[in-house]
Image: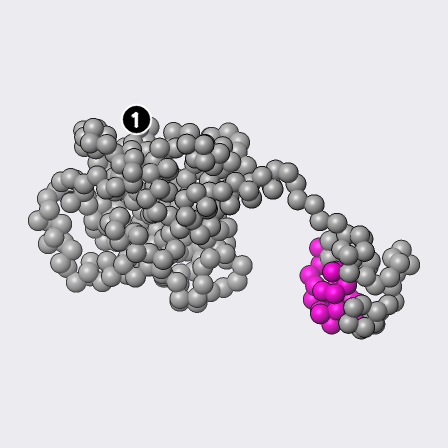
Amino acid sequence: MSGKNGEESGAQVPTEFDDAIMWAAWLYYADQMTQSEIAKTLKVSRATIVNYLQEARERGIVSVNISPAAGSRTSIARALMERFGLEGAFVIPSTDDASLAERLGDAGARVLADQIADGDTIGVAWGRTVLAAADRIALARPLRNLTVVQVSGSSTGEPEFSPELCTSLLSNRIHARCVNLLAPAVLSTRALKAALLAEPILQKQMELVHSANRILFGVGDIGPRATVRVACIASNEELDDYVARGAVAVIIGRFIDAHGKPVGGDHDERMVGITLDELMQVPSRLCLAGGATKLAAITATLNAGYATHFVTDMKTAEALLSR
């Protein structure tokens, strides 16, 4: 049987199939064989298999249908990209909020894995969603010269999603060099921070932070159950002061208002880690966030352009677009 390029199948077509085209289509779509594997089975070139599959669709042997749910998520993702000027958006189905951080992390891990290339330096923030992404990431193939760097100082708060854990876990999963930031997240005085950052080893580590071409981060609200309160990045009194001055969100320990503008202060000046201005200089910025309590925080983050790529759930996406 000839394909479009005139090449004939070198193998005998099984009796249950009308011709080699139907056989190839069955092997590809039903048995999920690769085009190269099918080419070996039929004893033809891979280019011939490509033509066979195209002809199978044209003859109606195979029809491709996109489910309404998947199509809806794709439309919503494109609407998010247009609304917030994103380079990419990925929307997952909504279920119960109890597992949202893990599900967003799983989706974020797949998006990041598709993006990573040889020689990348990946900055990593902290939080439950970031930790879930770090725990689930798997590369399709080994990559060379990867570096994972912690972009904020270490915390004495909740150890389960600390910056150093997120960084070391991600680097281990993708077999990358791991660079933890050897400093506390917040120091007691500005002078102490300046003295610490003058140390040669920390200067080198901060240079790596600034050289990151990708960064993975989440968005936090600053309500009573917010992750930033559990992490002990700031005291409740300090957090309440940020709220009083208009803060609605925290990104990698930095506070922003409803317009995405930094809400500074003495606490901010004592922090060790990437600043919001420095975040904006990273070429690829993957943000993972969702949930009803974070709508104001996510809106501020996206409107200000802190993310180039965004992963969220359907309910959050619809709510963002309706605001």
Quarter of the image with the N terminus in it: bottom right
Where is 107 relative to 247, above or below?
below
Image location (x, y in percent) of residue 301: 34, 41
Q: Magenta residues: mostly which secondary structure? A: helix
> In the rendered structure, which amino acid carries the disc numbered 1?
Pro
Q: Is residue 267 left or right of residue 126?
A: left
Q: Is residue 232 left or right of residue 42?
A: left
Image location (x, y in percent) of residue 252: 29, 44
Q: Nearer the viewer, residue 102 or 23?
A: 23
Can see residue 137?
A: no
What kind of element bears circle 1? Answer: loop
Residue annotated with mark 1: 224
Quarter of the image with the C terminus in it: top left
Q: Is residue 51 magenta?
A: yes
Badge 1: residue crowd in 10 Å (few <14, some 14–19, many ≥20): few
Where is 220 relative to 142, above or below?
above
Image location (x, y in percent) of residue 186: 19, 43
Can see residue 86?
A: yes
Image quarter of residue 188: top left
| Residue at point 55%, 37% (across, down) | 93
Image location (x, y in percent) of residue 88: 47, 50
Where is 65 relative to 114, above or below?
above
In the image, the segment drawn in magenta is 32-54
